[in-house]
Amino acid sequence: MVFPMLSRIGCALGAGLCLTLPTHAQDGPPVSGGTAIFAVGSDPATINRNISTSTADGLVSCVVYEGLVEVRAGGVIAPLLASEWTVSDDNLVYEFTLRQANWHDGQPFTSADVKYTLEEVSAKFSSTFSITAAVISSIEAPAPDKIVVTLDQPYDPFLMSLNCTQGGAILPKHLFEGTDPATNPVSTQAPVGTGAFRFAEWRRGEYVKFERNPDYWDAGKPYLDGVIAQVLPQSSSRTQALMAGEIDYVASQIMPSSDYRMLADNPNFALIPSPVPSIDVMVVNTTRPGLDDAKVRQALMMATDRDYLLATAYQGAGAAATMPFTNRMPWAADADTDYTKLYPYDPDRAIALLDQAGLMPDADGTRLRVALGYLSDDQDGPLVATAIKSMWSKVGVDVTIAPGERAAMVPKIFVDNDYDLALVSYSSGGDPALGLARMWVSSAAGRCCGNPTGYSNPEVDQLFDQAQQAAGQQARGAIYAKVQHILGRDLPTLTLHERILSSGLTARLKGMEHEYYLPTFREAWLQD
Amino acid sequence: MSRLIVSRLIWVLPVVFIVLVMNFLLTRLVPGDPITALIGDFPAPPEYEARMRAEFGLDEPLWRQLLLYLWALVQGDLGYSFFNRQPVAQLLWERTLNTLLLMVPVLIISSVLGVLVGMYAAVQRSRALDVLISALSLGGKSVPIFWSGQVLIILFAVNLQWLPAQGMQSIRGVDPGWPQVWDFVAHWLMPGAIAVAFNMAIVARVARVAFKESILGDYVTTGRAAGLSQRVVLFRHVMPNAMIPIITVVGNNFSNLLTGTIMVEAVFGWPGLGQVFMTSIAQRDYPVLQGVFLLVTLVTILANLITDILYAIVDPRVRAGYARA
Amino acid sequence: MQSSIPASGPDTRVRDRRLVRLLSSSVAILSFGVILVLLGCAVIGPIVYSGQELALTSASLVPPSGQSWLGTDELGRDVFVQMLFGSRTSLLVGVAAAVSATLVGIAIGAIAGFGSNRVDTVVMRVTEIFQVMPSFVLAAVIVALWGPGTMRIILIIAILSWPQTARLMRGEVLRIKSLDYVNAARCLGMTETQILWREVVPNALAPVLTVGTLIVGQAILLEAGLAFFGLTSPDVASWGKMLNSGQRFFYQGWWLSVFPGLAIFVTVLAFNLAGDKVAEIFNPRSED
């Protein structure tokens, strides 16, 4: 499972995160013309990011629709439909100036569209934006090109949440007002946005075509004559289509990681690492006998060779995890919590810990029998699970591998907690408050996709609360370090791997480096 | 003959009914529901979930859902796709057409070619050739499609770049007329060849055995003794007698018309019914699944009916058997 | 064609002669030889390499060499050892599913073909219901409810495969039971049941066996297909699973999918050719 981002990540979070992208001086100036084709994993259900969080819907939505701001790779927030904004000193009032733009049907874009969309659609239908909506006290439209948003309390990720990815894409009021956005044909058949490309044709099961918006507010852009989303359900077929020159771009969310190396080795193709970090985690049902003992969980961690997993099951992509949170948030790290020192791969020590926990080998030499689940659409799942089964067999832990389909597994793990161990991945969200806390806090239990472990520690809950409200990264980092210290000993989750997803593209497709999470193709162009 | 057809048609409704009820229950037995798939990875508020559930009628008890479904069906309403937000009938119509474009040529070519190859293997005298033909015709059915398909794609699409790797047509667009036809043929070639090889194998094998047996029949000896040419004996006497098992397997291939290609469609990105079916299972899109079941059921029943009618045409004794009642 | 009806028991001399013919066919010897070797591997291999099926022996994706004959996979497991363990699953699934599907198919097809019209109609309609059951949903339901497992895969494949045998069997029975010699047998006072088992069934066996051997192949392939859609447990090695996981690494390690692919091809081919020969030789009417 990869959870889309909720918040910024980037320079603000530490110098190490600033992705300095290579400048392609040899590419020359952008050339106009040509059509780029990108892959989607299935037909979109709806072309409206504000009412859907599925990857396929997202991949096509932000081509047509735009938010007030855009997030560029590296986490920089840049103007989009809003040309500029001011923020009051108390960080409560945001005043935006809007651009002169037209909807794809020719109607002018105004502040009424913004007010309507954020209040009536995003706040009600977007599971991401609704979190932001909870802190909005009012949205005013004093002039057609002015919008003023007042917040109840300071909320750092506010600007970020106004971009298309987060469910803040602005919709045309004149087409949505008075309708159910979920069934409105503008959502389900023919979207009308302000973006660089306008909707042209949709053949279900085959493609969705978009053509250049000649009336685009950013004169001169886009460079491409059109973009097409081709439906390619099988992950292997996406790479094949890319290699055969049939498509130009496979977004990081749906690019098979086993093919990274091959594309990297081929000069005709390129990889762009996603700025969105996520972690691969083994969640533990701490209510199961045996697994309820922290010593046992520590033993399991020591019986797991994370470096081996990285080199084999994860094909060398990413990094081995060293702490409960992602490694890429050094400001929230705890100096004492380093898995390479706390839990090095050491089967003998693991056995000693199991002895201490009272799990003695039975006649077969087995100390503990557990089932390890994963989602059947997780390509790395079978490899990781099989490797772990092999590693743990050396310490007398017998693993039954129990994969399941997503639709069946997600409720089983997160709602019913009917599992022993499961492999899932969590997006870090760029900030522990947004992407990671849900994994451990008691309040996120019993729902997808929160805390499935049965672990409930009032101290951890309290620390996460404090960290969210604290001001300044340093203060928050210190609190998170305390949390990591506790989690690193209690191990309700075994963080195994730092995942870095990459988009795959043909080398001739340029101008994609700035794309953040969902592609817009605003600056893309094709080299001859 | 008409009696045979009528006696079969009487059974269509009950069979369809039983299959529909069974499939309805089967799909709902599978853990997981469409709401999970629709909401995706994000934590959604419980009210949102409840609203969706009510919107799709999933909050009703199972038996009521079944009755509502059957009642709508009687009125000709196949339902509305949870996921695609589109009437099921419209969705399936487009995809069925695509599958037929792939499969009708496949079934015709594989049946004709299979019978000819089987017949040739049966009448020619070289044993080595016989074995070779058997082995070759078996090749298509001895290798997993997802693997052989991949090999073909890597060879002809990625390395040689002769044929397109994915889909049914060039989506960058081609001129209408002949270029469009050629474009389709180029896309059809790899999935079509694999499906032909797959369907042909069993036809050729059964045809070979059936022809061999028929050749040993009395009428052949008699015919030869009466001075008939080998060709006349073969087509006029051997062929009809060999037809029953051949019709059976060809009929079987036809009954798999719509679902026999799930794997081919998956590997070659063919936007057909098999693809909808697989996606809908993952999404638990019940109305679409039920629509697919209905179509598949009808096609199978039709294929079986035609098979039985052909039995009767080819072999008068079968007809007599039916008339006996 | 037989002109007289053996009054009692099979003729042992005829059977001996058939055995001789079978053993003198090079195709038969070759295909049976291959099957025997495969069975041997399936039985002995896992014993020899006991406990090594999960061993992460060396570096991952090492090409075939003297040390690991068929190379190592993406996790560093020995492909040869995996193949030996896989042969057990694949052969078991193939043979068990085919045998059960064929037996059920023969019985039901014979009942339909030989029974009264009413019986025929009812039985064939039931067969139809099974035929139109969507195989994949059935598999998904069974796997989801009871989890993936070799026995369940066999069960699924058997349930899905018997209708084709039944329909073929019925067609053959309908044809054969109206032939002259069956009428002659009736005149000689044989009961319908005797005719069914002594005359019709042995005569219809040839095409049914042909299909039966095809089911072995279908079963092995269907197991691979279920693996393709992630519906089998990675706990148990099988060729289908190896093929499926190997195809992800087609560019980096051709040996991962080529060897299991070859194994499946050779196995399916051997079963089919053997089936052909047996059908041909043991078919009473082919004896002259």
Image: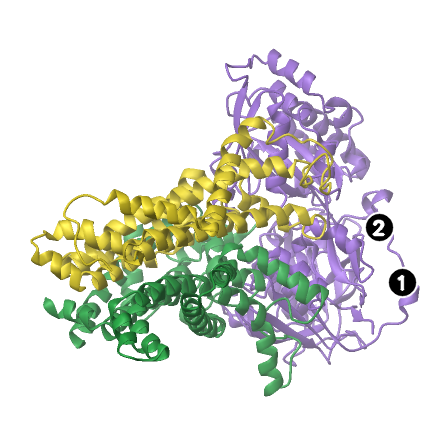
In the rendered structure, the colour chosen for chain C is yellow
Is residue A312 placed above or below A274 in the rendered structure?
above
Whole-percent x, y for residue A152 in the image: 66, 49
In the rendered structure, the colour chosen for chain B is green
**Image quadrant in which you'd find residue A321:** top right
Instruction: Identify by letter the chain in purple.
Output: A
**A45 left or right of A17 in image:** left
Viewer-closest of A512 and C111: C111
Residue type of the residue flagged with mark 2: Leu
Q: Secondary structure at mark 2?
A: loop
Looking at the image, is mark 2 or mark 1 earlier in the sequence? Answer: 2
Q: CA distance from mark 2 to mark 1?
A: 15 Å
**A303 left or right of C225 in image:** right
Which of the numbered marks, if any, corresponds to residue A19? 2
Q: Chain of mark 2?
A: A
Residue at horizontal 43%, vertical 65%? B204
Residue type of the residue flagged with mark 1: His
**A444 left or right of C96 in image:** right
Viewer-closest of C115 and C273: C273
Report which residue position mark 1 lands on: A24
Which of the numbered marks, if any, corresponds to residue C222? none
